[in-house]
């Protein structure tokens, strides 16, 4: 690759020859995913074998994806699109990540689509496979090399104009408290009034984060929800290791419960999607979410126990991380996608039902 470009290889690219023994013609068929696919970047499918995801705009290094993909390839983790390479550019501004090259997964469907189908049909068997996948991912990531120098956890700077009543004790608690404060400040109308009326209850849910964390801190996915789980011809695959674009300065090493909580609560978001978009009766959708959640967690626990690493999960952190995640969903809706507000509000209404005389 000529300067100023460079390629970091994770594993060997497949041959793009049309027939066994043919020379590569150099012009394999390319296509994009189409406007119907919601994606931040721009992806090109090459010969139905390889996907090149061009980052728009390019991202300054360090970036989480190259190191995570390289590690997962080396660790033998297979439940993802096969990672092949990263394309970078080096110039006076430093090194930037231009594109990621991974394998193409035939017949893949986005998680928000296939999982909403499962909710509408009342099927929950998939949740066991997702639990095992999440556990295998965390087992692989738990062997990610620790940082050579342990950095001081980032401080949380209150946003101007927000009254942040802090939960003292740890950076995790402070970040969660700020997420709640932002959600309260940015959620208006009847939803905002309802949320304000339950602020104390929500804050109490975050209290476990003030205690010292005893579970191992591992390199996590950072944005693990059903939308990052593709169902394809041969099973399920977790994708998108770019980190959470809505959470600035998130620590890369966190309790595994952070990922698991986001994945579990995303099932509740799917239930809300099924209610709104598929006409699923609310009671049926909520029962589905509860059953799917329990199957997911049980399969996750079982897999960790099989591999001798039950210590990776501190279950006392699940509930506070889930509440924090709902606050972040409300912040995301307020800043980027207002029509999404119904999903986190629906989850919170289900968790805090109206009191009856």
Image: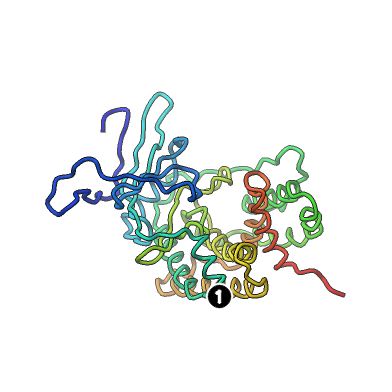
Q: Which picture quadrant has residue 159?
A: top right
Residue 177 located left or right of residue 66: right
Q: Position of residue 74 (x, y in %)?
A: 31, 55
Which quadrant of the figure contains the N terminus? Answer: top left
Is the residue 105 above or below the residue 130 in the image? above
The number of discs equals 1
Residue 66 at x, y percent in the picture: 38, 45
Q: What residue is drawn where x is 65% and y is 57%?
A: 326
Left or right: residue 47 compared with residue 277: left
Residue 124 in view here? yes
Residue found at the very far left of the displayed protein: 21
Residue at 43% across, 55% down? 239
Please name the colour scheme applied to the rendered image: rainbow
Give the residue at the far right of this rendering: 357
Picture quadrant where residue 72 is located: bottom left
The C terminus lies in quadrant:
bottom right
Q: Position of residue 7 (x, y in %)?
A: 30, 38
Q: Residue drawn 51% across and 57% down?
A: 227
Residue position for label 1: 122
Q: Secondary structure at mark 1?
A: loop
Q: Residue sitting at 34 percent across and 54 percent down? A: 104
Relative to 295, 29 lies left or right:
left
In the image, is residue 101 above or below residue 117? Answer: above
Can the viewer see residue 317?
no
Residue 75 or residue 26, whichever sits in front: 26
Which quadrant of the view contains residue 342?
bottom right
Q: Nearer the viewer, residue 259 or 326?
A: 326
Neighbour tally class for label 1: few under 14, some 14-19, many 20 plus, Cα within 10 Å: some
Q: Position of residue 341 (x, y in %)?
A: 67, 54
Query: Foreground residue, 179 or 46?
Result: 46
């Amino acid at each position: 690759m000529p300067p100023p470009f460079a390629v970091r290889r994770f594993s060997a690219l497949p041959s793009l020859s049309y027939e066994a023994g043919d020379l590569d013609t150099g012009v394999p068929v390319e296509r994009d995913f189409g406007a119907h696919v919601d994606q931040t970047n721009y992806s090109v499918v090459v010969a139905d074998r390889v996907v090149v995801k061009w980052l728009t705009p390019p991202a300054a290094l360090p970036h989480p994806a190259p190191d995570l993909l390289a590690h997962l390839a080396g660790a033998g983790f297979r439940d993802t699109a096969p990672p092949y390479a990263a394309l970078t550019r080096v110039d006076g501004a430093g090194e930037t990540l231009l594109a990621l090259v991974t394998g193409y997964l035939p017949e893949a469907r986005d998680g928000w689509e296939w999982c909403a189908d499962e909710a509408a049909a009342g099927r929950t068997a998939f949740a066991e496979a997702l639990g095992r996948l999440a556990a295998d991912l965390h087992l692989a990531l738990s062997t990610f090399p620790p940082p050579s120098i342990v950095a001081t956890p980032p401080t949380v700077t209150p946003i101007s104009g927000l009254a942040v009543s802090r939960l003292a004790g740890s950076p995790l608690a402070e970040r969660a408290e700020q997420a709640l404060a932002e959600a309260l400040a940015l959620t208006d109308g009847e939803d905002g009034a309802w949320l304000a009326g339950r602020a104390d209850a929500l804050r109490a849910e975050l209290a476990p984060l003030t205690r010292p964390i005893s579970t191992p801190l591992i390199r996590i996915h950072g944005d693990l929800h059903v939308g990052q789980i593709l169902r394809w011809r041969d099973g399920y695959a977790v994708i998108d290791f770019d980190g959470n674009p809505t959470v600035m300065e998130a620590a890369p090493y966190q309790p595994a419960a952070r990922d698991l909580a986001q994945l579990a609560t995303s099932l509740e978001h799917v239930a809300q999607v099924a209610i709104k978009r598929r006409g699923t009766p609310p009671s049926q959708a909520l029962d589905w979410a509860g059953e799917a959640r329990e199957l997911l967690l049980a399969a996750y626990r079982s897999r960790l126990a099989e591999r001798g690493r039950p210590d990776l999960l501190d279950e006392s952190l699940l509930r506070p991380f889930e509440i924090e995640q709902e606050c972040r969903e409300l912040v995301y809706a307020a800043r980027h996608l207002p029509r999404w507000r119904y999903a986190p509000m629906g989850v919170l209404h289900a968790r805090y039902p109206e009191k009856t005389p």
